[in-house]
Amino acid sequence: PCTGVVIVAAGSGTRLGAGVPKAFVELGGETLLAHALRGLTGLPGEVAVAIAVPAADAPRRQLAESLITTELAMLGERLVHASCVDGGKTRSESVAAALTTLPDHCDVVLVHDAARALTPATLVAAVAGAVRATGHGIVPALPVVDTLKQVDASGRVLDTADREVLRAVQTPQGFPAAQLRTAYAAAGAEATDDAGTFAAAGGIVEVIAGDDRAFKVTTPADLARAERAVQLSKG
Ligand code: C5P
């Protein structure tokens, strides 16, 4: 098997307010991107990686290239392809750009947010395994803990959602490679995640159990949470 992995690392990180693109913000002395790459080392067989980096930013592209060398060294010859591509204005444009550079022989493609830096390697491998076992799209997901309300433009509550049937989804999201390529080629309107694009093209998507550690670093509070987790794991 060959697992292609798209890592999207081209976001600006405005909500984090760190003044650098989010994937290049440091966590325990290493970038979020470095942490995210390390999560790929549990994948079996061949691995191909394409990273969407901030467009026209040569220093960050160089840093991403050197992180491929250092963080994925333990894959050795199993790393059959690695590239950095300019990301787009939206996340889905970044995914589409990276997807085109992955080798054709990948049977499964995972799409992963660099911002979910502490995602355990076991979850990454579980998503790829579930795609191969089912032939479906697979998304890691957690139960929704808050009660969710539907509101109108003025803030008036219209309805309460049944949270028993809702899930909060994470990444990596995994797909049969050929079907994902077709879905992205056909994609028009902006879906907010890859499973949305895949499902819009008629693909079946299933959830597997997500992991608390796969949370997305979005705000300064998230970064503080991630720092605590890294310090704890260092003992
Ligand atoms: O902004 P948000 O937190 O939803 O971004 C999720 C992931 O998508 C991040 O890893 C970010 O770097 C990436 N992204 C991207 N290109 C964009 C926007 C976001 O690669 N234009």
Image (cartoon, rainbow, N blue to C red):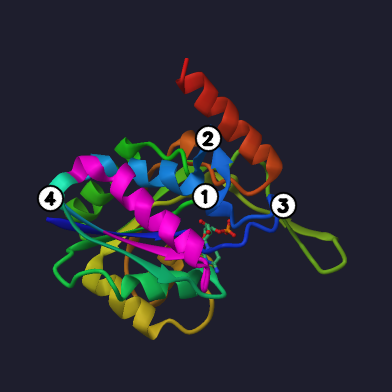
Query: What residue is pinned by disc 1?
Result: 115
| Mark 2 / mark 4, whichever is N-terminal | 2
Between marks 2 and 3 in the image, the one whose residue lies nearer the viewer: 2
Q: Which residue is mark 3?
A: 17
User: In the rendered structure, which segment of residues is drawn in magenta?
Assistant: 49-75
For the stretch drawn in magenta, what is the main secondary structure? helix
Q: Secondary structure at mark 3?
A: loop
State the residue at coordinates (30%, 79%).
Answer: 182
Residue drawn at (69%, 58%) of the image: 14
User: Dividing the image into 4 quarters, which one contains the N terminus?
Assistant: bottom left
Does residue 45 appear anywhere in the picture? no
- Between marks 3 and 1 in the image, the one whose residue lies nearer the viewer: 3
Q: Relative to residue 188, is residue 31 depicted above or below?
A: above
Residue 129 - label: none
User: Does residue 122 appear anywhere in the picture?
Assistant: yes
Circle 4 residue: 77
Residue 94 screen position, x and y as percent: 46, 71
Question: Which residue is drawn at the image coordinates 52% and 66% (left, top)?
Answer: 54
Between the residue at mark 4 and the residue at mark 3, the CA separation in whole angstroms equals: 38 Å
Q: Rounded to the nearest whole Å, what is the CA distance between mark 2 and mark 4?
A: 28 Å
Report the Cα–Cα distance between label 2 and label 3: 18 Å
**Which residue is tagged 2?**
29
